[in-house]
């Protein structure tokens, strides 16, 4: 089976932290680039962070300095460390993987990813 499984979501107060995990298996190899996206009801899916096949990372301006994407190839897990969370970070978070040959660096464009997890909810309250 081909799957990505997110975990680590939950409810946290503003200013707090969460660490999301994605059991990615084979998708953590150098053949795949990976990313984290988020979506709220009625809105378009938004790229949050990406890590490329070449190891480069990219972040949305809204999370720079607060979120960190990383992966552990040995454990086959993709992570998203989220600090200083705000109400605007509330969303369903998805991990994704892709291997389009022309994409090497991390990408925040959902269209270049072809494998998606089911999502984990992050809710930031006062």
Image (cartoon, rainbow, N blue to C red):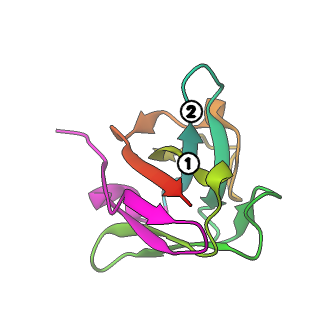
Give yes or no for residue 12 being in the magenta stretch: yes
Residue 7: give x, y in percent of width and height: 30, 58
In the image, what residue occupies the spot 68% across and 57% down? Answer: 106
Q: Front-most of 86 and 65?
A: 86
Residue 32 showing in the rendered view: no
Label 1 with label 2: CB-CB less than 8 Å: yes
Residue at image coords 33%, 63%: 8
* Side of 105 relative to 14 (left or right): right
* Furthest residue in direction top, as rendered: 42
**What residue would you read off at disc 1?**
90
Residue 122, image x and y in percent? 45, 52
Q: Nearer the viewer, residue 63 or 1?
A: 63
Q: Is residue 79 visible?
A: yes
* Residue for point 59% across, 62% down: 53
Residue position for label 2: 40
Q: Position of residue 41 (x, y in %)?
A: 54, 25
Q: Which residues are magenta?
A: 1-30
């Amino acid at each position: 089976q081909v799957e990505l499984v997110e975990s680590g979501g939950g409810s946290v107060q503003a200013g707090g932290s969460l660490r999301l995990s994605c059991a990615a298996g084979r998708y953590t190899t150098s053949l795949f680039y990976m990313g984290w996206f988020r979506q709220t009801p009625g809105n378009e899916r938004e790229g949050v962070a990406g890590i490329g096949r070449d190891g480069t990372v990219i972040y949305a301006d809204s999370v720079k300095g607060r979120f960190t994407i990383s992966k552990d190839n040995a454990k086959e897990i993709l992570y998203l460390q989220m600090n200083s969370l705000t109400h605007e970070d509330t969303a369903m978070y998805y991990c994704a993987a892709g291997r389009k040959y022309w994409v090497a660096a991390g990408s925040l464009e959902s269209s270049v990813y072809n494998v998606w997890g089911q999502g984990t909810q992050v809710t930031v309250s006062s």
